[in-house]
Amino acid sequence: MLIVFSGLPGTGKTTIARELACRIGAVYLRIDVIEQALRDAGMLPGASGYGVANALALSNLTVGHTVIADCVNPVRESRAAFTASAAAAGVALLDIQVVCSDVQEHQRRVESRVSDIPGHTPPTWQSVVAHEYEDWDEAPMTIDTAHITSAHAVETITRHLSCTQSTLPIAFINTRSRA
């Protein structure tokens, strides 16, 4: 299974995605880490970060690992690439959009962030507000971190995964994914 966390910086994606990855034993791919590695190598990340993430996701999916991608995923093209990776691996895709509907809390989170990636500069509130983020063609599962804790979000997603898994054919569950 490919689980893609999407949403603007400061909404809580990374906290939830990391915790879920630990809980279910998934491979965790964070676009910020990939893009910083590209910068450190003297390259411009742009769409390259998403290309690397999709290649890593596909290689892990094809050997039966569940993969969690943690990214802004702001445009239809990046979303379509993750859909194509899941389809190429023959696995289910779960899109999860993380939002923070409390604007003051969202701004506080962004402005108080300290980077946990060497060399990475966290975005400013102004850059978050101006960030391109297209509407979804089909509404993904949405988690609003203004109303629930990260622990509750992980529980909600874990329950959803359990229900989803119970509706998949047995052969699909046994041959494709641990989650």
Image (tube, rainbow, N blue to C red):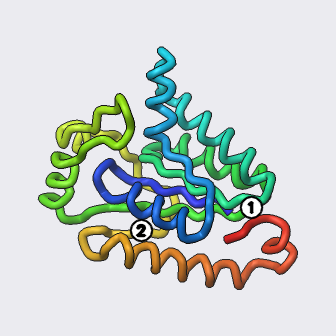
Residue positioned 35% across, 43% down in the render: 116
Q: Where is residue 133 in the image (x, y as percent from the top left)?
A: 37, 46
Image quadrant where residue 103 sits: bottom left
Is 8 placed above or below 53 here? below
Disc on res. 142? 2
Disc on res. 70? none
Tell me if 9 is positioned left or right of 63 in this view.
Answer: left
Residue in the foreground of this view, choosing between 96 and 16: 16
Q: Position of residue 9 (x, y in %)?
A: 32, 48
Q: Earlier in the sequence, mark 2 or mark 1?
A: 1
Q: Which residue is under mark 1?
A: 91
- Type of residue at label 2? Thr
Tell me if 151 is positioned left or right of 43 in this view.
Answer: left
Residue in the foreground of this view, choosing between 116 and 44: 116
Instruction: Quarter of the image for the N terminus: give it.
Output: bottom right
Residue in the foreground of this view, choosing between 106 and 19: 19
The answer to whether residue 139 shows anywhere in this view is no
Q: Where is residue 87 in the image (x, y as percent from the top left)?
A: 74, 54
Secondary-structure class at tag 2: strand
Tell me if 52 is positioned left or right of 156 in this view.
Answer: right
Is 139 placed above or below 87 here? below
Q: Position of residue 30 (x, y in %)?
A: 49, 46
- Type of residue at label 1? Val
Residue positioned 62% across, 84% down in the render: 163
- Rounded to the nearest whole Å, what is the CA distance between mark 2 and mark 1? 21 Å
